[in-house]
Amino acid sequence: MFSGDRRNGFGRKSDAPLGALLLFLVSGILLLSSLYAAEASLFRKARESVLEAAAPILPIFSVPAQFLQDVFGNVEEYFFVLEQNKSLREEIDALRQWERDARDLREVIAAYEALGYYVPPPDQKPVNAVVIGESNDAFVHTMVVNVGRNDNVAPGQAVVDDRGLVGRIVHAAPNASRVLLLKDVQSNVPVYVEESEVEGILAGRTKAEPAIDFTRFDDLDRVQAGQRVLTSGAGGTLPRGLAVGTVSRVTEKEARVRLDANYARTRIVRVIKYQFPLIQNDTDGMENVGDEQDGSVGEDGEDAMPQDADIALGQTSGSEQPAPLVPLDDNQDN
Amino acid sequence: MYAARAENLFHLFRSAAPTLLGVMGVLLLASPIRLAQGYVPTPLIPLVVVYFWSIYSPASLPAFGVFLIGIFHDLMTGGPLGLWSTIYLFTYYIVVSQRTYFQGRDQQVVWLGFVTVSAIASLILWGVMSLLSGARLPIGGLVLQMLVTTAIYPVIAVFFAQFHRRILVEG
């Protein structure tokens, strides 16, 4: 079988299968249709079904590799124990200072709370998850986690690890979900730069460092390397203040961001179930949003903000005493 | 009776084995293996499966099997549906149409053929993804992944050749 007697010249056709050509055309049509209807219910269901079916199998493939990596990783770490000890001690010293500051601030907040000036931000209910898969693709950057609709995980929710924001849920099967990472070209997350207070959209560039697109070009002058980047909460799908990264360099058009999350080490993550806060005394708004809740979050996650939220906020802007912001009742999460 | 049934099952396995290997390649690709702390991308084993059986035994890997591997790959990564099936079927069509050239040649020639096919597949992938995203995407990551795949090809090809000869042909 491996010894072909005939040796035709390269470029001469032989046995060209017609079936392959037909299926090639079918694939092309699928590709074009997925361009216009990427979130069509048929495609979404197919993705979720395959995700659900593959979820129990995926860990089997990664366990041996993980075991080997742990063994070699441990051996490697023995050589750096002294250095690591030193840097950890320094880090502890710095963290002690932060702990003192945090305790002081907590007292200040408690004082404001007692006076009724402060309303805490809405609760973020995290769900712990393990990364069981990832795309390993040059252009599509996603991860698969082992929680899904059965754990009340829905598209649009933020996924964080111990360092910062990892991405957002894009597909949720009953027991597995797909996370779109921040560096994917389709990822757009509203962020703001601390210190300069400039808002923008963090857009993936399929490189390690995504870039912030600013709506105003003069904002770029205020942004400097080293400033922290956090989620702004604009759009209402993500909570405000999740750590994203640090500005690494500012070019003529955009600011590059070094992400806090290290995708090569992300194993355990938290999915943050967040509801956009609404005005308590706006009964109409609450009723309408209750209807919205039944429909869950929008398909693409970006347009998932309750439609009445703007109106509800707008109604209070004219009043003398702003009504406290409270989270939606969390019945649906329980 | 049992022997006949077992033979039927084995026959079924033989006809589906390369497709199953491709599916396993996709599962391996979708696992968080992270070679060398994530600096080395996971090789594209399904591309090797498609190339190898397109040359040596397209009858064992029908076009529909290639289509299935591609669709499964798309569904697992979450990318546009039809992208990888287009790439794999294009590879399949080109290689099957040239298979008489490759048969009986040195492994180096076959390997060079794989390098060429990988380069063409990369260009198509990059072009389609750039068109779909509306921006000229960086190609560095893809080149690195294809380099790793082509570097590992000779090793996998030896394993596949043994598998094909001992199980699919002689078994």
Image (cartoon, helix red, strand yellow):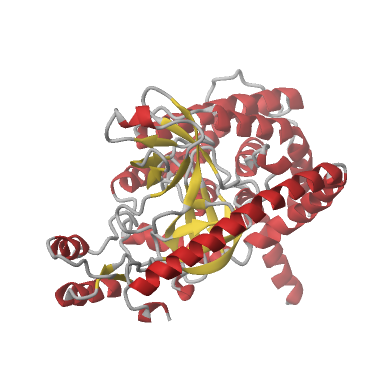
x, y percentage for residue B55? 64, 35
Q: Is residue B163 visible?
A: yes
In terms of depth relative to the viewer, which is nearer, A309 or B64? A309
Q: Quadrant of residue A240?
A: bottom left
Query: Residue A250 in the image: x percent, y percent?
Result: 44, 27
Q: Position of residue A85 (x, y in %)?
A: 81, 48
Name the quadrant of the C terminus of chain A.
bottom left
If the image is split into quadrants, where does the N terminus of chain A sit? Answer: top right
Q: Where is A288 relative to A140, above or below?
A: below
Q: Quadrant of residue A158?
A: bottom left
Instruction: In this rendered view, identify the residue nearer to me: A152 or A306.
Output: A306
The foreground one among A333 and B7 is: A333
Compared with residue A14, is residue B30 higher up or lower down, i.e. above or below? below
Q: Is residue A130 left or right of residue A217?
A: right
Q: Is residue A189 visible?
A: no
Instruction: Please tell me which residue lies in front, A312 or B141.
Output: A312
Direction from residue A298 to residue A104 in the image, left or right = right
User: Against B112, is B17 above or below?
Assistant: below
Residue A241 picture quarter: bottom left
Task: Give above or below for B100 relative to A152.
Answer: above
Marker count (numbered): 0
Relative to B23, A26 lies left or right: left
Tell me residue A209's x, y (percent): 51, 35
- Residue at point 62% right, 34% down? B145
